Amino acid sequence: MKQVLNPLGDISPETFMAEYWQKKPLLIRQAFPDFKSPVTPDELAGLACEEEVNSRIVMEKDGEHPWFPMFGPMSDEIYANMPETHWTLVVNDLEKYLPELSWIIDRFRFIPEWRLDDLMISYAADQGSVGPHIDLYDVFILQGMGNRRWQINSQHVTEENQIKETPLRIQKEFKAEEEWVIEPGDMLYLPPGVSHHGVSLGESLSYSIGFRATSHADLVNEFIGYITQDLSPQLTYQDPDQRIQQHSNEIKQDALERVTDIFRQYLKPDHPELQRWFGCYMSDTKASIDTSPEREISSIEELKKLASTSTLNRHPASRFAFAQNPDSTLLFIDGEDYEVNPDFAKSLCRQREIDLDELVAIANSDELQLMVDLYNGGKVYFESD
């Protein structure tokens, strides 16, 4: 297994999680020492021209209105008409399209991997920016090329302080509390709700490692949809104890209590399906990317033969997680769940690289077939694929 270096400088992961995570910003000089961007501006621009890639350009000036966004796919004509300054190209899900970049996100495995959203890269022309704004998620911003000036403000931002003409959450007024110029290898951590404004000093590239921020509304709606999808329509509101009311139109307390009892049957923290639903929900990937191999295999022996000449990896376009119970372990992959033994789940998920010999030694026949299926489905892959 490759050694995973701490990207937090002199701060331990334990100290970071206790004192900074979702609490306060942190600047780490040379978090990635001597970092050289593995992606060039031209390569990023080329990716943004592909149909399936999630990309956008933010133009501070010269657009239909200030902070005008254009959504991909991009084209050579669009790039040819870009001004020399004050614009930014943003591309999401880079680790999924370029799995060789997964080593960057793997530096952050001290945070549960199922919390990870994506690796985003932004190219900015001189003075390029996406404006002063807030995010609702945690993000680490790693400088990849050139320099950017970052300013932050931790004060609450009201709806009235947001520009209406753009779908972006750009602030009308922004006053910096702190300011830094960061260079390649430097990294800034920002918890949710901290306003930040990055301006490129010349051309630059930034890598953003973002973590999922699922709203309460989405969690509740998705869970209700999950637990009600197979409920019989014959299960209806009933009131055999109903009494004559003085006012026929009145909704009385006893009716509300019957509804509350219905809700209590399903919306409870010890619901037997909560773990399975949450694992499937959090492992479901929003990016639809075909990662299947050119040639499928039919047996674990074929997989072992391929592994003898190359390294088997979990594909970063897929999400892996597991949950342990006293009598079973649920393995979650891209919104699907599998009952496996705990050692198998731990070995498969331990690192990006998979020790296939170790897996084969502890796997049962169903788990061996699962490995074949995962390869054929592109969930695991060889670096040479």
Image (cartoon, helix red, strand yellow):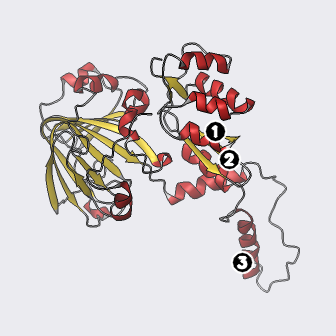
| Label 3 sits on residue | 251
Q: Earlier in the sequence, mark 3 or mark 2?
A: 3
Rate crowding at label 2 as few (under 14), some (14 to 19) or many (20 or more) other CA atoms within 10 Å.
many
Horizontal side of 346 relative to 97 (left or right) equals right
Q: Are marks 1 and 2 in contact (CB under 8 Å)?
A: yes
User: Of 140 and 8, which appears nearest the observer?
Assistant: 8
Q: Are marks 3 and 2 in contact (CB under 8 Å)?
A: no
Residue at 26% of width from left, 57% of height from top? 26
Q: Viewer-proximal residue, 59 or 329?
A: 329
Query: How many labels, in total?
Result: 3
The image quarter containing residue 363 is top right
Q: Nearer the viewer, mark 3 or mark 2?
A: 2
Residue 306 percent coordinates (x, y): 55, 16
What amino acid type should be assigned to the residue bearing mark 3? Ile
Dot 1 falls on a residue whose secondary structure is helix
Looking at the rendered structure, the kind of residue marked 1 is Phe
Outermost bottom residue: 246
- Mark sitting earlier along the chain (1/2): 2
Q: Secondary structure at mark 3?
A: loop
Q: Which mark is residue 344?
A: 1
Mark 1 or mark 3: whose residue is earlier in sequence: 3
Q: Is residue 336 above or below residue 254?
A: above
Crowding near the residue tagged with mark 1, few <14, some 14–19, many ≥20 C-alpha atoms within 10 Å: many
* 66 in relation to 372, above or below: below
* Mark 1 → mark 3, Cα distance in angstroms: 54 Å
Q: Residue at x 18, y 59 (%)?
A: 174
Can you identify the residue that label 2 sits on?
A: 329
Label 2, secondary structure: give it.
Answer: strand
- The residue closer to the viewer here, 250 or 329, is 329
* Residue 368, quarter of the rendered image: top right
C-alpha gap between disc 1 and disc 2: 9 Å
